[in-house]
Amino acid sequence: MTDSPAVRIPLDPHEQPILDRLLSIRTELELLKQDKSTYVKSQDVINLYNQVVDQVELLNGIRTQKRHEQNRVDTVLDDCFQLISLAYLTIGKNNEAPAVYSAVSTIKRLLEHLREAAFFSPKDLESISSRLQNYREAVERGRETHSPHLLLLVEARIDICQDILSELQDKLSQLDEEQGAKYEKLVSILRSLAGCSTKSKFPAAEVDDLYKQLKEIEASLDKDSRPTAKSPSIDELAQSLQIQMRTQSPAPSGQRLVKDLLTRCFLWVELVKQKQGQINENFRDTYEKLRDIRNQLERLTLTQAWSLRETDLYSFQRQLDRVDESRVDGNFLDAEGRPADLHAQRTLLYLLRKSYALIYHLIISSAAVSEPLLPIYNQLTTLRRCLVEVKKSGGVSSPRELYPYSMKLNSIDNMRIDGKFMVGDEIPDGQANVIELLEECFELAYELRVQAEDESEEERKDEKEEGEDEKEDDTEDKSDDEDGSLAMKAK
């Protein structure tokens, strides 16, 4: 089991029974996620969720005079809510308030890391802003059905995220459209350079190509926007950028933002080439651990539809949380308590942020379909993709070519009982999404069949017209021959 980050605060004796019960619930939730021999059942998840809410109510009754205390109970409670949130995704209840908890917690981590890294793109912020709005709406919809204790907790986290988001948006508020495009490109280049330091073999050619792109961007700027000959060191620049991000100073001009980020990219190219992908040995273990987590998550993004049970993300979250919360004032420390050098610090932070970003991507990509229906949903998704590609390529030449698709769709449709996909006596969540996808596939197949029939009809009509033209030509030729014969006889 991957435990939550340790919190060493004395525990109120009255809270011990609550802690014991929460530990028991957490164990049940972990056993639920680990049992791959059967599907996660909605009723099991909802029962455990109700038990956690009961413990929250007892805790709030004890803490009437100490609302902001944080101890072991709170960390285990957070574990329970994280697992329940991911379990709600697993059973297809993506749009309900409990499912929001894990996503919002991950967004909070991401925003804190973006602020710490001191560079991010407008698109990063736009995506997060849209998601936060969706999650706030989900909380509002759950007013009548979910515990106010949970809703208050989720709302508080959304508010924290919104505050950080507004702060970051303000930092980029002076970018005009042209500057925004250049800044976006520079953010992409800087992230790619950080990624180059984490590859098994240092990609010198890729770094050179990124450097050329930087020179092209520099050439497109006016002289005032280009880095000066006496640029600061990367340490000085990183320090000044962090101070700028953490203070309430007015938003820098768009020109200044592009210039500083371009300078930072050039300095980072030098540092990356100097290190050649070699990390400080004192931080090798942390580096390998974070790189392994990132690689596993990247593989999951490729096979998500077929192999991911959302509750599996919990172990990744907790491993990352322990690494993140082991830092002191944002610094990674070695065994002797010494902070990492800038290259190690930034490389480790990149891996940490990238891993949280992959978890966020997997969460928001989760289909609102329960686990038992996922095989059907995935088959329909593949069928839809194939039919769309057939349509894009010009359709089929004959309705017969659609038989395999029609047979598969009919076999899936025949699995329904009274219009619903059943698993035993249960009606799994996500029926509407699966049925909507099935109907879309039928509609695509119908459009392709009509198109093929129309084209076949046109071809038959053209062949008939060609046949009639040939018949008329033969009649004319025969008439000409008869006229010639009569003329010869007349002679």
Image (cartoon, rainbow, N blue to C red):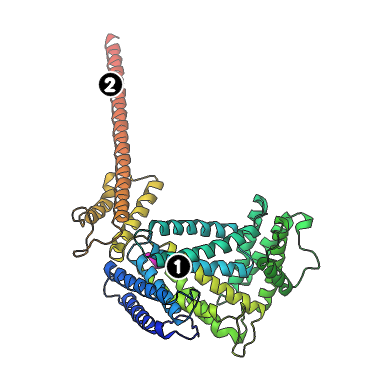
Q: What kind of residue is marked 2?
A: Thr
| Helix, strand or loop: magenta stretch | helix
Label 1 or label 2, whichever comes before in sequence order: 1
**Residue 210 versus residue 424: which sits nearer the camera?**
424
Q: How far across and how far down the image is residue 455, in percent? A: 32, 37
Question: Which residue of the protein is positioned furthest toward the right in this rendering?
Answer: 230
Which one is closest to the eye, mark 1 or mark 2? Answer: 1
Q: In this view, does 223 lie to the left or right of 324?
A: right
Q: Quadrant of residue 370?
A: bottom left
Bounds of the magenta segment: 301-305
In which quadrant will I find the C terminus?
Answer: top left
Q: What element carries label 2?
A: helix
Q: How far across and how far down the image is residue 359, in percent? A: 46, 69
Which residue is drawn at the image coordinates 61% and 71% (left, top)?
194
Distance (Cα) linking label 1 and label 2:
90 Å
Question: Which residue of the protein is positioned furthest toward the top in this rendering?
Answer: 490
Image vertical order of residue 258 relative to residue 45, above or below: above
| Residue with the mark numbered 2 | 475
Q: What element carries label 1?
A: helix
Residue 255 forms part of the magenta stretch: no
Question: Which residue of the protein is positioned furthest toward the front in this rendering?
Answer: 65
Q: Do the residues labelled 1 and 2 touch (CB within 8 Å)?
A: no
| Residue with the mark numbered 1 | 153
Image vertical order of residue 94 relative to residue 341, above or below: above
Q: Quadrant of residue 226?
A: bottom right
